[in-house]
Amino acid sequence: MANIVWHPHPIDQAARAAQKGQQPVLLWFTGLSGAGKSTLAGALERALFEAGLHTYLLDGDNVRHGLCQELGFSAADRAENLRRVGEVAKLMVDAGLVVLSAFISPTIKERSRLRALFPVGQFIEVHVATPLVVCEQRDPKGLYVKARRGEISDFTGISSPYEAPLAPELTIDTSQGELATQVAAIIEYLIDCGVMHGEREVATAS
């Protein structure tokens, strides 16, 4: 953009990460409404926090109370919502944090654009692949009932498609197994890829 120049600062991501003793990354939880994204991400954040990591969780509903409060649910507004969240997550990762983001983010194109903001290895896509029938049975916000009645247009999974990730780093079906086991599987992945150290004591959700 004209007349705007990036100003470099003496403290970079590597220095911030070294200070915190961790490898900053973004874990992006994608899946249908009711799939368990926020529950899983929240339980993981608790486990990481108790293990001594510096974390922050960006939740789809929560950001609409402030950062994205003026946005609706049109295709353009949803795209802008994710664009803003992606830029905020990028800043947080640059600050040296382990960031967790729970958003439906229904299209491969949107998630590919988000991944492109980060160096290889810093964007970890977690597909919360809970089946639609289970999500409808849960329906914690009553949205599926409204969508089936036609009261909500372009509702992902009903009147609007969800494009499952083609090659996510992790796939978890929250209708299978216990929450603690699912959290442990993500932590094992983080240890394997060097984000966490195996010797750290990890407390998983009960």
Image (cartoon, rainbow, N blue to C red):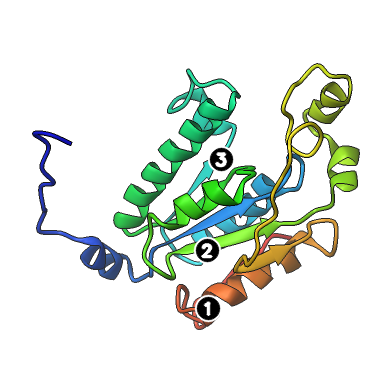
Residue contact between numbered discs 2 and 1, judged by CB atoms under 8 Å: no
Residue type, mark 3 in image: Asp
Q: Secondary structure at mark 2?
A: strand
Rendered residue at 59%/52% (across/down): 108
First reached walking from the N terminus: tag 3 or tag 2 = 3
Q: Which residue is mark 2?
A: 124
Task: Report the disc number at residue 191.
Answer: 1
First reached walking from the N terminus: tag 1 or tag 3 = 3
**Badge 1, how many Cα within 10 Å: few under 14, some, many 20+?**
some
**C-alpha distance separating marks 2 and 1:** 13 Å
Q: Left or right of 166: which side holds 190?
A: left
Q: Left or right of 121: which side holds 168?
A: right
Q: Is residue 113 above or below residue 170?
A: above
**C-alpha distance separating marks 1 and 3:** 24 Å
Percent coordinates x, y for residue 76 in the rendering: 52, 27
Rendered residue at 37%/43% (across/down): 87
Residue contact between numbered discs 1 and 3, judged by CB atoms under 8 Å: no
Q: Which residue is mark 3?
A: 59
Q: Left or right of 155: which side holds 41?
A: left
Rendered residue at 67%/53% (across/down): 40
Residue type, mark 1 in image: Ile
**On the rendered image, what quadrant is the N terminus found in?**
top left
**On the rendered image, what quadrant is the C terminus found in?**
bottom right
Q: Secondary structure at mark 3?
A: strand
Percent coordinates x, y for residue 203 in the rendering: 61, 67
Rendered residue at 58%/29% (across/down): 75
Q: Is residue 145 above or below residue 7?
A: above
**C-alpha distance separating marks 3 and 2:** 16 Å
The mark closer to the camera, 2 or 1, is 2
